[in-house]
Image (cartoon, rainbow, N blue to C red):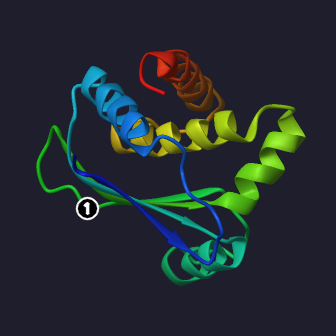
Amino acid sequence: MPIRFFYEEVDFKVKNPLKLKKWITASAKREGKRLAEVNYIFCSDEYLLNLNKEFLNHNTLTDIITFDNSDNTGEISAEIYISIERVVENSKKYGIKEETELHRVIIHGILHLCGYKDKKTKDAALMRKKEDTYLSLRKSFT
């Protein structure tokens, strides 16, 4: 599969990686995209903050940064960095399981790569609806 998981500065490993990869792949396919290569890098707040400063000129914590390396329409090639610390904090903030929040962030990155935006209220609402749709399909894979 063209999905790989890497870990930087965290004591964390994804559960059921093969099933997770199948779910991500199927979700992208439903959006009309094929995954060429997607690297998920799970990291610390500090690691992601440094990337945020260096590449986006933002001095703020974030849960995810997605770098689109795609060359062909209909095909996804990317690096997706996810702060495990932000995922844990957000799961507590929203009163949901850490795994659910992690999966939301994982699919959020894929949705950005499929062309969805989340800066405007209307766009964010559609993004959230799409996230919920794909989260509901996880049971078939995870």
Q: Is residue 22 visible?
A: yes
Q: Quadrant of residue 129?
A: top right
Eyeballing the image, is 55 above or below 21?
Answer: below
Residue drawn at 30 percent across, 25 percent down: 31
**Residue that badge 1 annotates:** 69
Residue drawn at 58 percent across, 20 percent down: 132
Q: Is 10 displayed left or right of 138 in the figure?
A: right
Eyeballing the image, is 88 above or below 97?
Answer: below
SS category of the residue bearing label 1: loop
Q: Nearer the viewer, residue 23 or 36?
A: 23
Q: Nearer the viewer, residue 43 or 129?
A: 43
Looking at the image, the residue that sits furthest to the left is 72
The count of marks equals 1
Eyeballing the image, is 136 above or below 10?
Answer: above
Q: Quadrant of residue 83?
A: bottom right
Residue drawn at 14 percent across, 56 percent down: 71
Q: Nearer the viewer, residue 106 or 53?
A: 106
Q: Tag 1: Cα neighbours inside 10 Å, few (<14), some, or many (≥20)?
A: some
**Residue 61 picture location, percent across and down:** 73, 67
Residue drawn at 66 percent across, 69 percent down: 11
**Residue 28 picture location, percent across and down:** 31, 31
Q: Is 21 displayed left or right of 123 in the figure?
A: left
**Residue 8 picture location, percent across and down:** 55, 75
The amino acid beneath tag 1 is Asn
Q: Is 27 displayed left or right of 89 in the figure?
A: left
Q: Is residue 119 visible?
A: no
